[in-house]
């Protein structure tokens, strides 16, 4: 955990951003081929739909009227995946910085 004490605030922000990019790639990555086929199909007969209903986020890709990819997640689950890991990283960072500050004060005495 000592490496966290050397992090600057911008490095913490970069770590959060990297986490969110990886999370987005992991969740929408499997849909990407279907999205590309639907949007680049001859005659553009593709359809992409994102919706929120009954606390469920849904994403559907259709090509020529056929569903080629669908995914859904409960809103609370998505919110926890987005918020909890960066929050845990921030708490660990604060704790490491306070320990380092305490050690520095103790060394001065």
Image: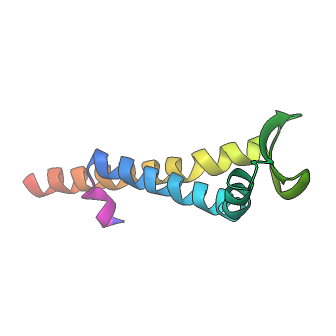
Residue 86 is a magenta residue: no
Q: Residue at x 21, y 57 (%)?
A: 103
| Observer able to see residue 49 | yes
Q: Main secondary structure of the magenta part?
A: helix
In which quarter of the view is residue 53 placed? top right
Between residue 59 and residue 77, name the one nearer to us: 59
Q: Is residue 77 left or right of residue 100?
A: right
Q: Residue at x 72, y 60 (%)?
A: 37
Tell me the quarter of the image containing the N terminus: bottom left
Q: Is residue 49 left or right of residue 79?
A: right
Q: Position of residue 46 (x, y in %)?
A: 78, 49
Q: Is residue 7 left or right of residue 95?
A: left
Q: Residue at x 74, y 60 (%)?
A: 34
Residue 6 is a magenta residue: yes
Between residue 7 and residue 38, name the one nearer to us: 38
Q: Is residue 30 left or right of residue 84?
A: right
Which residues, given as a range, are shown in magenta?
Answer: 2-7
Q: Position of residue 85 (x, y in %)?
A: 55, 54
Q: Position of residue 12 (x, y in %)?
A: 36, 50
């Amino acid at each position: 955990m000592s490496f966290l004490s050397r992090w600057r605030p911008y490095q913490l922000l970069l770590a959060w951003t990297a986490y969110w990019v990886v999370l987005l790639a992991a969740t929408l990555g499997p849909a990407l081929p279907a999205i590309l086929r639907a949007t680049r199909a001859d005659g553009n007969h593709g359809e992409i739909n994102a919706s929120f209903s009954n606390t469920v986020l849904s994403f559907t890709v259709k090509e020529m009227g056929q569903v080629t990819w669908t995914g859904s997640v409960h809103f609370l689950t998505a919110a926890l995946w987005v918020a909890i890991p960066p929050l845990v990283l921030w708490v660990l960072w604060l704790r490491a910085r306070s320990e380092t500050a305490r050690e520095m004060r103790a060394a001065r005495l």
